[in-house]
Amino acid sequence: MHSVAGQESSPSRRRPRQLSSSSSSLASAPKRPKHADAGMASAKARGKLPEVVDLTEKPSAFQPHAGAKKLVIKNLRRPGNRDAQIEQYYARTEKDLDEGLGAIFAGCKPAVPLERLYRGVEDVCRKGNAEKVYRMLMKRVEKHLQSVVLPRIGKAGDVPEVDVLRNVLAEWKTWNTQTILIRSTFSYLDRTYLLREALPSINDMTISHFRRMLFSPSQCGGRSLENDVIGGVCVLVEYDRRGSTSMDGELLKDSIMMLYVQGVYTKYFEPVMIKTSKAYFEEFGTSWSASGLKEYIAACEKLLAREASRCMAYNLDSTTERLLMELAHRILINDYSEKLLNEGSLANLMGDKDLKSMKGLYDLLQLSGLQKKLKKPWVDYVRKTGAAIISDKEHGDDMVIRLLELRRSLDLMIRDAFGRDEDFLWGMREAFGGFMNDRTVAACWDTGTSKIGEMTAKHIDMLLRGGLKTLSKSLLSDAQDRATAEKEGQASTGDEDAELDRQLDNSLELFRFIEGKDAFEAFYKKDLARRLLMGRSASQDAERNMLTKLRGECGSNFTHNLEQMFKDQELAKDEMEAYKQHCQNTDEGKPPVDLHVMILSAAAWPTYPDIRLNLPDEVATQIERFDKHYKGKHTGRVLTWKHSLAHCSVKAVFPKGSKELLVSAFQAVVLLMFNGTGGPLTYEQLSTGTGLTGGELERTLQSLACGKARVLTKHPKGRDVKKTDTFTFNATFTDPKYRVKINQIQLKETKEENKATHERITQDRRFETQAAIVRIMKSRKTMGHAELVAEVINLTKKRGSVEPAAIKKEIESLIEKDYIEREGNAYTYLA
């Protein structure tokens, strides 16, 4: 039995076993090691050690004893004495815990080590006094908060809310530190009794007690701590909104976290925050409503961005952020929607091409679902601006450029400000179609034809003659456009041909809006002929590409004559090859003049005036020779020579060097008049010798004597040519280039000629309308008036819209010509 007592007396084994097993008995643990040590010391003092007998093994010399056995127990304790000692231990432990809590609350280190306090809590709980310990702990916590912390928070009396909040936060941080020590000391209680009884944990209990101290109905110094704490947080938010130097970001962030932890954020703080924010937003809207729309948009954007960043920076709840944003949207956007959608203010922003403000406005309206209401003022602006451009006769030559610039600015606004919203794209197209076909502003010379059709054709002519260099940078595609085109596989970035193709597409967009396409066709045909005959096309590929676009847009009937013009070019090349081969095979030999003739179909090409010209004998001979060859090859055909379209190359010998002059036929005939003459020639002499008269001779002399390359000298000097002027060969002419091109001064189209063209278009439209009526009536025999009008409109819509009144007029004309007759409200075909 001595061996058993010796094992129990080992401190190094007994204590760990208490830590690892929660079911170990605490009855004999405090004193048994001490008594065991004392027994051993007493035996040693008597000079002998207690005998140790191994009862687990059988000794080799063991002799069974048949007599009576004797068991000796030393140092036997009396039960009464042991229980008294245990009670003293528990009483001392409870006292140590109480003193330890007092030290923790005082911010001092407990006199008893925390490990010993932890063991004490465990021992007391094992004895069955866990509830007593828990109640003691809650009592001490409540007492400390009410008697120490609460007076300390409010001891300053009537202080600002932010200072009260700062005191509360300081006490809260201290309380958190103290709570950590309390939880560590009483963790056994937390893990056993509280868990088993489903009671609040020590952490929850300490938080709830602190919360009750702050947010209970009790008063501190005549003031409510709840109002001071919540009010202090809202004051800090107000400081941040107004940019006050009193703003303390760390205090605000920590305070909001405190409200989260205490579980009062939603119940106490959020409603007050929303209420104060509502007042702030209303004040903000009132103060900024008197400013301009641009300033108001910028201010609202800035405010909303700050509100969102504040919620993020100070960890406001997502619900709070949503409520704040909804409140701001309702007050600043919905309540001021009339200001945001004011047509006058919007027109100024769009006129200034203020993409930033328009994007801000669109984004603001989108937040409240009002962005669709922006469409009406948008469409009205496009319609009014476009109508003003078309009706501006003083700047008629720049009409298409201005329309394209308007379209470009609107496209950028849709792309960069409206997020490619298709409603605005369709609205813009609707507005363009409206003002471009409004006869009150788009008609020309009271003929009913569209001026925009003419100007669009001329703009495309400028593009196909001069390429991209004729455009301003504002019309060219930007990097984003090119990147999109490259992504879609349309062209590579920086491709000039692709950019020219995009510009032609932009012009074609205007063409699509035009209902009267016959005006466009007439002027496009006229300009195309000039480009083909004079070799002025910047790109043949672009010419054919444009023709393909027109065929796809309007059909083959629209482009039939245009395609024939290209075919005539190809046939002319073949004809000239055959003529040159014929010349080589005859005895006449190589002609002295390299003649190139273009044979044009009269039906496909525009009509040109016949101007008499006295050609040099060499040229006249070659023309007769070609005429004879062609008529022999094509029986029945007649050639009419248009010298006004001819051009040639003339070699000129000047004292300072020979030059090759690229000139028109008119210019060449005038220059040849100076061969062999040393003196001046009068205006009359030049007119008689060349056969040119009037304006043609004046423009030709002006180009040779008053232009950039002055190969003739006019006497007297001046820009205008008069019949009294004389001209001499300019012996001092010089130019760094060998080949010198002398441009013919083009006669600017007069108003009378332009009017005549439009009247011819109107006349053609009348004939087409009559032809459509006859075609329909011939197939249907009998039709009602309304049905016939609808059929005619449908049949002629690709050529241009025809008003019902004009159709009725042509019906009357056909009745007079006995093509049809009227019976009541129906028509019958006669012819």
Image (cartoon, helix red, strand yellow):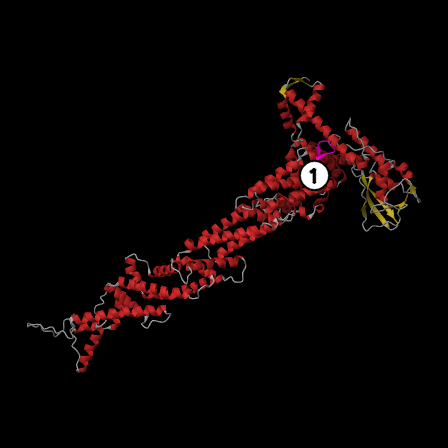
Quarter of the picture containing the C terminus is top right
**Is 19 included in the stretch rendered in magenta?**
no
Q: In this rendering, is residue 694 above or below 831?
A: below
- Tell me how many marks there are: 1
Report whether 438 appears left or right of 51.
right
Report whether 158 appears left or right of 719.
left
Give the residue number, with chain letter if any, for mark 1: 390
The quarter holding residue 23 reads: bottom left
Q: In this rendering, is residue 294 above or below 790?
A: below
Residue 290 lies, in percent from the top left, at: 60, 50
What residue occupies the far left of the structure in this picture?
A: 67
The quarter holding residue 777 reads: top right
Magenta stretch, residue numbers: 442-451
Quarter of the picture containing the N terminus is bottom left
Residue 107 lies, in percent from the top left, at: 38, 70
Residue 211 lies, in percent from the top left, at: 38, 59
For label 1, the SS is helix
Q: Residue at x 62, y 26 (%)?
A: 790
Report whether 168 appears left or right of 787.
left
Q: Crowdedness of circle 1 by 10 Å Cα count: few (<14), some, many (20+)?
A: many
Callout 1 amino acid: Ile
